[in-house]
Image (tube, rainbow, N blue to C red):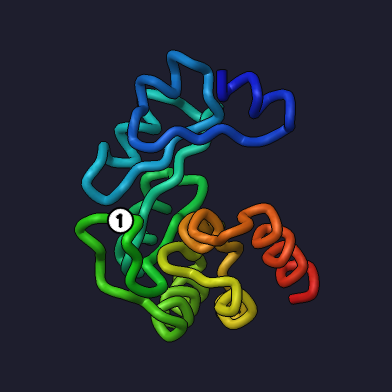
Amino acid sequence: MPLDTARKSGATFIIDDRVELVRELGADGVHLGLKDMPIADARRILGDRFIIGGTANTFDDVKSHWEAGADYIGCGPFRFTTTKKNLSPILGLEGYRNIMSQMKEHGIEIPLVAIGGIEASDIPAIMETGVSGIALSGTVLRDENPAEKMKQIIKILQNG
């Protein structure tokens, strides 16, 4: 079972969209998209012991999730990606800079993770915007050697 594997490796197990399944399985948390259950409702159901993350595309999304009790924000997309359907407007570096600046102005302190169409070569510039981290899938999974691609990405992050 994936949850057992996550526990043994010390990984955090986050389930996408399924709040009741998180509670039933005892996963670590849930990630909710903009059209999924509201963060505040998920917090009422799960309480404080579960991690709740939310998808954002604008500062208003970030502020709303923060006020509702989210633990982190997945913000994007950085650029066009085929991983998601119904893609929100593309942020690019300037979009992340603007959101991070507005967060600072409003005293909002919540981890913000960049996501969506990110390539290994983008990582240093994205991290310079002040985001807390990055999320990758396609750039790794489409590579001929995903394990080597991950090693390359880890080196980039360690040197950045």
Between 111 and 104, the residue placed more toward the observer is 111
Q: Residue at x 46, y 39 (%)?
A: 52
17 versus 67 height, above or below: above
Q: Residue at x 31, y 75 (%)?
A: 90
Where residue 131 appears, as percent x and y from the top left, is 56, 69
Where residue 142 appears, as percent x and y from the top left, is 49, 59
Q: Residue at x 44, y 23 (%)?
A: 22
> Regarding mark 1 in the picture, which secondary structure is present there?
loop
Indicate the quadrant containing the N terminus: top left, top right, bottom left or bottom right. Answer: top right
Indicate the quadrant containing the C terminus: top left, top right, bottom left or bottom right. Answer: bottom right
In the rendered image, which residue does mark 1 sit on?
84
- The reply, left or right, for residue 158 in relation to residue 115 is right
Tell me which amino acid carries mark 1: Lys
- The reply, left or right, for residue 97 in relation to residue 68 is right
From this viewpoint, is residue 160 visible?
A: yes
Between 50 and 125, the residue placed more toward the observer is 125
Q: Residue at x 49, y 74 (%)?
A: 100
- The reply, left or right, for residue 79 in relation to residue 151 is left
From this viewpoint, is residue 112 visible?
A: no
